Image (spheres, rainbow, N blue to C red):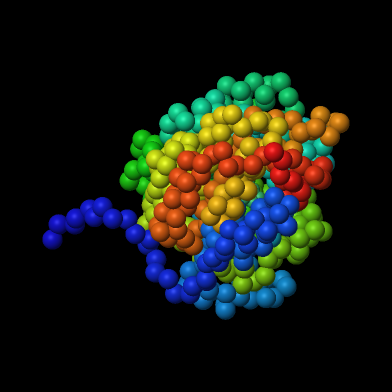
Amino acid sequence: MKEIQWKTKFEPFKIKVIEAVPVTTAAERLAVLKRAAYNPFNLPAEKVTIDFLTDSGTGAMSDKQWGALMAGDESYAGAKSFYRFKDAVTSVTGFANVLPVHQGRAAERILFGVIASLKPGATIVSNAHFDTTRANVEANKMEALDIPVKEAYLFDTPGPFKGNIDLAKLKKVIKEKNVPLCVMTVTNNSFGGQPVSMANIREASKICKENGVPMFLDCARFAENAYFIKTREKGYQNKTPEQIAREMFSYADGAWMSSKKDALVNIGGFLAFKNDTAWLQKAKEALILGEGFLNYGGMSGRDMEALAVGLTEGLDENYLAYRIESTAYLGEGLLKAGVPIIYPPGGHGVYIDVKKFLPNFPQSKFPAQSLVCHMYKTGGIRAVEIGMLMFGRRDGKGNWLPAEMELVRLAIPRRVYTKSHFDYVIEVMAHIAKNKKDIKGLAVAWAPETLSHFSAKLKEVN
Ligand code: F0G
């Protein structure tokens, strides 16, 4: 019989365990938001109906992953679980030297500590550093320089690989500055979760090699990136996501992963090196000092088991097709509802272009954070601001400086929400788009110096 290509897309899993979705009243949400000082990081999750704060560690594990937890070997040294984890990482990345860490930023702290000890004051160059990556570079008194392609800033202009690095700038920066490392973030979280092409990874690697600069992948969402390459880049249509991922890693000298994303676990990560270098030796010392012994880092045996299984599931083609298409469904729905987004939608989330959505909203009143709060008030939806508050620049006299971007990210947990949850979000956003005048501005009442957005306290202003 001929295979028919059905038009209806469905989630490629069925539900075995459920968790109730909190439903709240408007009065409750107003009170809770005020208590949370207009910062979604302070909201109790039991008062959040749809939680799009992050796709990190918020995914649902499979029956196979839950089963694997029982096989966790909790030996301090030489645990079976460590070898299963290490083999899974090596088989996906090709890297033989694997250090377990509790999450991505632990790998960043270790790696940038090592680099800064060998090359103080250096410049780390990237298509874009994620905020914890930047913070760890800067905490080690180095410069974190982003050189995305210019299309990355053209939010409403479509393009297949708007996550790419600017190759001409890369050459120039390497010549002019003291650059010990180039980081390719796949997908590019800070610029809309946009993918990086294989050609761009290959060329960047060539430039780095010619100049003796190592290149690492910050590969939290490498599987989503591989799927975009499969569907958008010539020559990859008949390759599996696994083969594509393997080629991506083949151009790099190492990688770190926040496995809380594409490895479908709630906690975990790794730092991996192609070769046994001085960096690896120093990183091992730092791992034992701050995370744990070489065979578990910051994870338990059962965490490593779940991660090993999740790495393979995250590369499954049916899963990836569902993942990328469901993000696109939400993105297209928002666009139709009159909400401008970074286009095309990225892999793990949809990013609202708030400067375009609220063109008359005063820059000084935190437009993206104001929209985040309004989304919670209106529909119990939690999202995150990428704007003035997150970038956190002040003039030295306590005044906040406007940011180049004012975005709201709706990051989608993996295998958690269904299409009707997305339809609900689209309906709420369409209502907001028709009633923009109800959105209230904000001012900062208190904020710490670094990574301010996580704990800042705000108040409403007229
Ligand atoms: N690199 C990228 C590209 C990330 O997106 C993240 C985390 C990290 C590194 C740090 O990893 O959280 O495990 O320590 N991103 C989350 C987010 C927090 O919401 O985008 P971590």
Q: Quadrant of the N terminus?
A: bottom left
Tell me: 435 left or right of 402. left
Tell me: 56 left or right of 312. right
Residue lying at the far left in this picture: please name it: 1
Q: Quadrant of residue 116?
A: top right
Q: Nearer the viewer, residue 96 or 172?
A: 172
Q: State whether residue 58 appears in this view.
A: no
Q: Position of residue 331 (x, y in %)?
A: 44, 44
Instruction: Please report the residue visible at 67 percent of the width from the left and 39 percent of the height from the top.
Output: 441
Q: Nearer the viewer, residue 357 or 448?
A: 357
Residue lying at the far bottom in this picture: please name it: 70
Q: Nearer the viewer, residue 267 or 388?
A: 388
Instruction: Please report the residue visible at 62 percent of the width from the left and 26 percent of the height from the top.
Output: 170
Q: How many labels were placed on the picture? A: 0
Q: State whether residue 11 appears in this view.
A: yes
Instruction: Please report the residue visible at 39 percent of the width from the left and 40 percent of the height from the top.
Output: 336
Q: Quadrant of the C terminus?
A: top right
Q: Position of residue 410 (x, y in %)?
A: 54, 48
Tell me: 147 left or right of 461. left
Q: Position of residue 191 (x, y in %)?
A: 57, 37
Instruction: Please report the residue visible at 62 percent of the width from the left and 40 percent of the height from the top.
Output: 368
Q: Position of residue 375 (x, y in %)?
A: 57, 49
Give the vertical position of 333 relative to 363 (above or below).
below
Tell me: 456 left or right of 45. right
